[in-house]
Image (cartoon, helix red, strand yellow):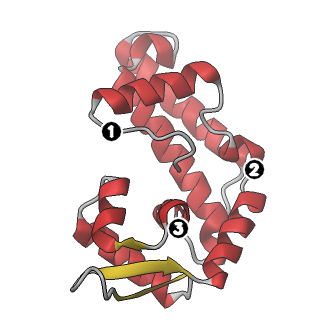
């Protein structure tokens, strides 16, 4: 069941008004902490994207993993986990699901010893193309506003994340 954009907007409005009422403010800007704004926006955005990707057997986590892999492939699972700032065990589950759907392959690397090398399949590349075309412009350009994007990059850099131009 796909939740229309209007429903998400209503959900945010209700959540904002509840939060504002609790805080005694008249808007999210006045009553919510920055962390609450950021986590609420991210959670609602992720829910919307997950619903749109459901038909392709993808989640936001899977899409982000495929995008990162596309930017650096071939990659080991460990290097991909570092790039995505995930624990290897968490990424392993995501990769197993993606591999089961035929979006990528994992195999032993002659150069890396026991490490598994991860590569996109043609189906994975086609799915990335489909996702880029399917997600609404607002989702593809999320954070394209200079102020928001700059603030997010500054936040991540403050947390020690290296931001590479063109990285997913």
Measured Cα–Cα span from mark 2 to mark 1: 27 Å
Mark toward the start of the polypeptide (3 vs 1)? 3
Q: Residues within 10 Å of mark 1 (few under 14, many from 20)?
A: some
Which residue does the numbered mark 1 point to in the structure image? 161
**Does residue 60 sit above or below 108 in this rendering?**
above
Q: Secondary structure at mark 1?
A: loop
Residue drawn at point x = 42 percent, y = 78 percent: 118
In the rendered view, does 96 fall on the left or right side of 148? left
Which one is nearer the viewer's eye here, 118 or 123? 118
Residue 73 visible: yes
Local secondary structure at mark 3: helix
Q: Residue at x 48, y 89 (%)?
A: 100
- The residue sitting at 36% across, 15% down in the picture is 23
Q: CA distance from mark 3 to mark 1?
A: 20 Å
Query: Which residue appears at 52% of the width and 23% of the height?
Result: 150
Give residue 11's position: percent from left, percent from top.
57, 40
Q: Quadrant of residue 114?
A: bottom left
Rendered-image quadrant of the N terminus? bottom right
Circle 2 SS class: loop
Q: Which mark is drawn over residue 62? A: none
- Measured as percent of width and height from the top left, residue 13 is found at 58, 30
Q: Residues within 10 Å of mark 3 (few under 14, many from 20)?
A: many
Q: Is residue 98 left or right of residue 117?
A: right
Q: Label 2: which residue? A: 136
Pick out the residue farthest to the front: 111
Image position of 87 (left or right of 157)? left
Q: Nearer the viewer, residue 31 or 150?
A: 150
Residue 86, given in percent of the width and then of the height, sits at 29, 58
Question: Which residue is disc 3 drawn over?
Answer: 66
């Amino acid at each position: 069941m796909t939740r229309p954009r209007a429903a998400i907007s209503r959900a945010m409005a209700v959540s904002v008004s509840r939060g504002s009422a609790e805080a005694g403010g008249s808007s999210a800007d006045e009553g919510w902490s920055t962390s609450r704004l950021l986590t609420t926006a991210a959670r609602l955005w992720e829910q919307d994207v997950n619903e749109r990707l459901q038909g392709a057997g993808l989640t936001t986590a899977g899409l982000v993993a495929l995008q990162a892999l596309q930017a650096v492939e071939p990659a080991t699972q460990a290097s991909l986990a570092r790039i995505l700032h995930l624990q290897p065990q968490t990424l392993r589950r995501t990769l197993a699901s993606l591999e089961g759907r035929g979006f990528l392959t994992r195999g032993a690397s002659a150069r890396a010893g026991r490490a598994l090398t991860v590569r996109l399949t043609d189906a994975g590349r086609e799915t990335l193309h489909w996702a880029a075309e399917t997600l609404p412009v607002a989702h593809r350009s999320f954070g394209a506003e200079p102020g928001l994007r700059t603030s997010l990059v500054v936040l991540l850099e403050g947390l020690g994340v290296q931001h590479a131009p063109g990285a997913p």
